Image (spheres, rainbow, N blue to C red):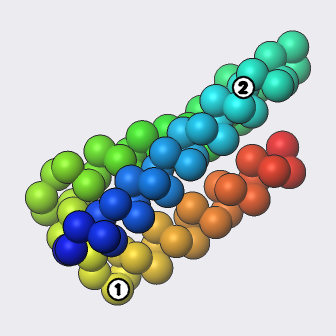
Amino acid sequence: MNNMVRNNYRMGGYLLLALGLINWQYQNNDAGVATRSLLILMPGVVVIAMTFIKPLDAFMGSRVGMSLIAVVGAILVGLSFLN
């Protein structure tokens, strides 16, 4: 995978990480906020970590990997705005 695609994955991971933390901050008095925020935050951490592991990096460069991560990422971003 080239560096531009890898950088885009990292930026998407940072986006999910930031949205999870922002969600946690703005709803800190709400019951169950930790679960909902971690549902958004943890996949971001996983995507960032996957870019540093060679076999997973190769999977992310495949068409299936790109499609899967794009769909899951879009769902999580939508969830963060609806939450």
Q: Is residue 24 above or below residue 63?
A: above
Q: Residue at x 46, y 79 (%)?
A: 67
Relative to 15, residue 38 above or below: above
Occupied quadrant, residue 35: top right
Q: Is residue 8 left or right of residue 22?
A: left
Q: How far from the left and from the top, in percent, is residue 62?
A: 28, 81
Q: What amino acid type is highlighted by mark number 1?
A: Arg
Residue at the far front: name it.
Answer: 4
**Which of pointers 2 and 1 lies earlier in the amino acid sequence?**
2
Whether residue 71 is situated above or below residue 41 in the rendered picture? below
* Residue indicated by mark 2: 24
State the image quarter where residue 11 is shown: bottom left
| Residue shown at the point (37%, 82%) measured from the top left | 64
Can the viewer see residue 30 in this picture? yes
Q: Quadrant of the C terminus?
A: top right
Write the residue at 26% across / 55% down: 51
Q: Where is mark 1, residue-wise?
A: 63
Question: Quarter of the image containing the N terminus?
Answer: bottom left
Residue at the far left in the pictured view: 54
